[in-house]
Image (tube, rainbow, N blue to C red):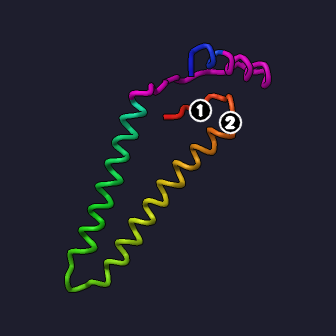
């Protein structure tokens, strides 16, 4: 969000609520930070999936744990898909409003 957009929002809020808006802080996150977070999250998901696979496959005395590990990986990938899908749906339905894409 640009400083100009923030100023417009604050002005509109002051008009609508007939009150002075006090801003405690204002910070923005640039696209480079967003891509770093996306990359780190992707790596974390892959590492978690590998660790779950290793842990569920290690105990040779308990081969019944493999389906639980598989289910955990599927659940984690489902969670990632829900978050990404929700973000994309919000971006699609906001048509023209400012929602960052990355």
Mark 1 packing: few (<14 Cα in 10 Å), some, or many (20+)?
some
From what the image shows, is residue 56 above or below residue 18?
Answer: below
The residue that label 2 is drawn on is: 94
Looking at the image, which is closer to me, 68 or 20? Answer: 68
Residue 12 belongs to the span the image colors magenta: yes
Looking at the image, which is closer to me, 4 or 80? Answer: 80
Image disc number at residue 32: none
Task: Tell me which corner region of the image, top left, top right, bottom left or bottom right, holds residue 36.
Answer: top left
- In the image, residue 49 lies at what x, y percent? 32, 61
Stretch in magenta: 8-32
Q: Are marks 2 and 1 in contact (CB under 8 Å)?
A: yes
Task: Tell me which corner region of the image, top left, top right, bottom left or bottom right, holds residue 90.
Answer: top right
Mark 2: secondary structure: loop
Q: Residue at position x 45%, y 65% from top?
A: 75
Q: Which quadrant would the N terminus be assigned to in this image?
A: top right
Mark 1: secondary structure: loop
Total labels: the figure holds 2
From what the image shows, is residue 22 above or below residue 67?
Answer: above
Q: Residue at position x 67%, y 29% from top?
A: 97
- In the image, residue 43 lies at what x, y percent? 32, 48
- In the image, residue 80 lies at what x, y percent? 47, 54
- In the image, residue 54 lies at what x, y percent? 24, 68
Residue 51 belongs to the span the image colors magenta: no
- 2 or 1: tag closer to the N-terminus: 2
- Give the residue furthest to the top: 4
The residue that label 1 is drawn on is: 99
């Amino acid at each position: 969000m640009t400083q100009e957009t923030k100023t417009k929002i604050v002005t509109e809020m002051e008009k609508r609520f007939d009150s002075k808006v006090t801003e405690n802080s204002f910070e923005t996150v640039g696209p480079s930070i967003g891509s770093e977070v996306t990359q780190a999250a992707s790596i974390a998901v892959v590492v978690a999936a590998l660790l779950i696979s290793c842990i569920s496959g290690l105990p040779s005395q308990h081969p019944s744990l493999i389906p639980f590990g598989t289910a955990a990986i599927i659940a984690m990938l489902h969670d990632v898909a829900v978050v990404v899908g929700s973000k994309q749906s919000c971006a699609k339905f906001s048509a023209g409003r400012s929602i960052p894409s990355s």
